[in-house]
Image: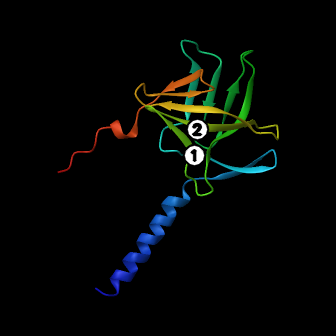
């Protein structure tokens, strides 16, 4: 039993390290200052964002930090994107009344300069907004049915 306890501890530490390592943190530079971004904030950020009631223009966010930004003139650009976080991967946000506001960073894939805009989650409405106008509805992970225990 005494030999298995240290092995169990090592296994737990390795498992925790693996779980933490799955959060991808990308350093970016904006006006000579380093920032960090991630695509993992505990809510389903990836997906299709549209202007309410319209099919286009869109913003498509993929889980790997790539996507498509469609301008008002309907031209599309491939982008890289992320939500600002600490160096450790903890999302940076401002808490509001039933909402949270984040810094959303993106850049066209063929350009060097990053652009920042607002990303917000409105919990009661179950909606996410980019730039205050592109919106998507989401399902909160906490609202999903729990598996029944036997």
Q: Which residue is mark 1?
A: 92
| Location of residue 61 with respect to 56 vertically, above or below | below
Would residue 80 be found to the left or right of residue 47 on screen?
Answer: right
- Residue with the most extreme left position: 150
- Residue with the most extreme bottom position: 2
Give whichever of 147, 105 is nearer the camera: 105
Q: Position of residue 52 (x, y in %)?
A: 54, 15
SS for callout 2: strand
SS for callout 1: loop
Residue 118: mark in rendering: none
Q: Which residue is mark 2?
A: 102
The answer to which image quadrant residue 148 occupies is top left
Q: Position of residue 118 (x, y in %)?
A: 62, 32
Measuring 73% from the left and 33% from the top, which residue is drawn there? 78
User: Tell me, what colour scheme is on the image?
Assistant: rainbow
Give whichever of 1, 97 is nearer the camera: 97
Measuring 53% from the left and 36% from the top, which residue is drawn there? 45
Sequence-wise, the earlier of marks 1 and 2 is 1
The count of marks equals: 2
Would residue 10 be found to the left or right of residue 119 on screen?
Answer: left
Disc 2: CA contacts within 10 A as few (<14), some (14-19) or many (>=20)? many
Q: CA distance from mark 1 to mark 2?
A: 6 Å
Q: Quadrant of the N terminus?
A: bottom left
Would residue 115 be found to the left or right of residue 25 on screen?
Answer: right
| Location of residue 72 with respect to 149 vertically, above or below | above
Q: Position of residue 6 (x, y in %)?
A: 38, 82
For the residues labelled 1 and 2, say whether their Cβ atoms are less than 8 Å apart. Answer: yes
Q: Position of residue 61 (x, y in %)?
A: 61, 34
Measuring 29% from the left and 38% from the top, which residue is drawn there? 145
Measuring 63% from the left and 53% from the top, which residue is drawn there? 25
């Amino acid at each position: 039993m005494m030999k298995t306890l240290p092995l169990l501890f090592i296994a737990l530490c390795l498992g925790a390290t693996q779980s933490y390592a799955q959060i991808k943190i990308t350093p970016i530079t904006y006006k000579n200052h380093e920032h960090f971004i991630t695509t993992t904030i505990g809510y389903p950020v990836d997906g299709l964002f549209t202007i309410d009631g319209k099919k286009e223009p869109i913003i498509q966010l993929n889980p790997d930090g790539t996507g498509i930004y469609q301008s008002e003139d309907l031209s599309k650009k491939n982008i890289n994107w992320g939500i600002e976080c600490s160096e450790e991967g903890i999302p940076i946000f401002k808490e509001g009344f039933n909402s949270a506001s984040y810094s959303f960073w993106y850049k066209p894939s063929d350009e060097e300069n990053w652009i920042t805009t607002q990303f917000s989650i409105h919990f009661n409405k179950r909606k996410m907004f980019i730039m205050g106008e592109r919106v998507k509805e989401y399902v909160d992970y906490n609202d999903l049915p729990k598996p029944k225990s036997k």
